[in-house]
Amino acid sequence: MPARAAKIEIPRWIQLVGLPILLLLLWVVASAVRHVVFLFLVAFLLALLLSPLVRAVQRVRLPRGFAVALVYLVFAVVLIAAIGALGTVLVNETKTAAKRVDSYFTDVNGQTHQVDADRDVDRLQQWLSTHGLRTIHVQRRGHQLVRDIRKHDVGKYTNKVVNFLEGAAISIGKLLFSLIVLIVVSVYMLLDLPRLARAFDKRFPPHPGSESLLVRMEHSLVSYVKGQALVSLIIGTSAGVGIWLLGAIGALPGGEKYALVFGAWVAITELIPYLGPWLGAIPPFIYAFVVHPVSALWVFLLFLGIHQIEGHVVVPNVMGSALRLHPLLVIFGLLAGGEIYGLPGALIALPLLAAGRAAWEFFGERVELEPWEKGGAPPVEVELEEAPPPPAAAQR
């Protein structure tokens, strides 16, 4: 078995002077061209993710350029179709839900001569009275709250939500230009990945039986993305099915109509670590609370159960050792990504950490720092001069 290559030792003077200056320069340049750095990082991650597909297409003896073009064409078609379908469903279902919320506070029932909100307030007061809670009076304040909401015209607020979503859909169209630039940059990166891999292997030869740097980063990133996508699919499907069941049994009126949009929302927000589960539960809970307070309780219990299963069963078994990072480092990466580039920065923080961990392990096997205690303290030459004798001694 061939011996491993000797590690590259970084001298102490470079550690003391060179590395701090290099880090400072990188920070200054990255801050000056923050958007460009973000664009190239995302393009690099995209190239690593699609590299296995390109190799699979190349197995049928197709040139790499044609394989890259075919993979990106399929990827673009699937992405545009998914965004269009999801955006259409989201806008339509939100309009329907907005109309339902509006009618809940404004449409007067012909039989009771009340809006549904006032009727539910009376029902809540009746339920409290029949269960020994007559000292709790919610009827007067509840009706006052309904009148205040009607006075401020709830339709204006629901229309604002619809307009916001429609504006978001238009913004997606404006982002297509950035997406095209991103794809072009990632295409060039993907075409040059073999050349880049050979350059790294020449400078840092892989140990016998080990993988090269780019292959390690690719496997680490693909493993993380697969696990995260599966977790999002499981949690989103569970939330959608749960809301549909609540609607089917009458615990959440209208829930079966909006199960798809709520499930899709939960799956998307699940991509945001730590905050995603809470963000995903907010719209279903608000809708349920507007429909009926008891329905909100059922939705709360549903998401509480889903999150318990997610934390104790789904994430440990699906994600496994895909990330292998300390939780404090994960939190720091999320906060740093959000501080530097907002929500998009937080979204790519963990994929970058996954690829960065693979690079750290790779270079940790090949590079070492010269220890400061090596050889003890450096010798220092000191010249000693003989002092003249004191005057008294000279006289004697």
Image (cartoon, rainbow, N blue to C red):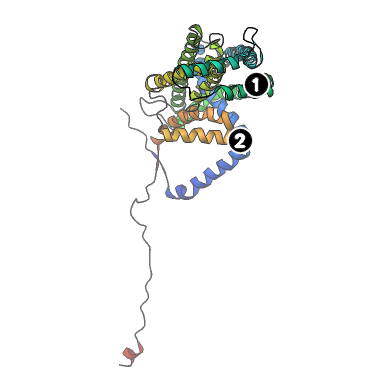
Q: Please say if the residues under marks 2 and 1 sit with CB atoms less than 8 Å apart.
A: no
Mark 2: secondary structure = helix
Residue located beneath label 2 in the image: 34
Q: For the point 40% across and 25% down, which residue is it? A: 211
The quadrant in which residue 283 appears is top right
Q: For the point 60% across and 39% down, which residue is it? A: 31
Looking at the picture, which amino acid does disc 2 mark?
Arg
Q: Earlier in the sequence, mark 2 or mark 1?
A: 2
| Mark 2 residue crowding within 10 angstroms, few (<14) / some (14–19) / many (20+) | some
- Give the image location of residue 237, x and y in percent: 48, 13
Q: Nearer the viewer, residue 114 or 217?
A: 114
- Give the image location of residue 165, x and y in percent: 65, 20
Mark 1: secondary structure = helix
Q: Which mark is residue 111?
A: none
- Give the image location of residue 80, x and y in percent: 62, 14
Q: Is residue 219 shown left or right of residue 105?
A: left
- Give the image location of residue 271, x and y in percent: 50, 23
Q: Is residue 96 shown left or right of residue 60?
A: right
User: What number of labels is visible?
Assistant: 2
Q: Is residue 265 above or below residue 359?
A: above
| Mark 1 residue crowding within 10 angstroms, few (<14) / some (14–19) / many (20+) | some
Residue located beneath label 1 in the image: 161
Residue 171 visible here: no
Q: Nearer the viewer, residue 290 or 346?
A: 290
Residue 259 visible here: yes
- Which mark is nearer the camera, 2 or 1? 1
Q: Where, quadrant-wise, is the N terminus in this rendering?
A: top left
Looking at the picture, which amino acid does disc 1 mark?
Val
Q: Where, quadrant-wise, is the C terminus in this rendering?
A: bottom left
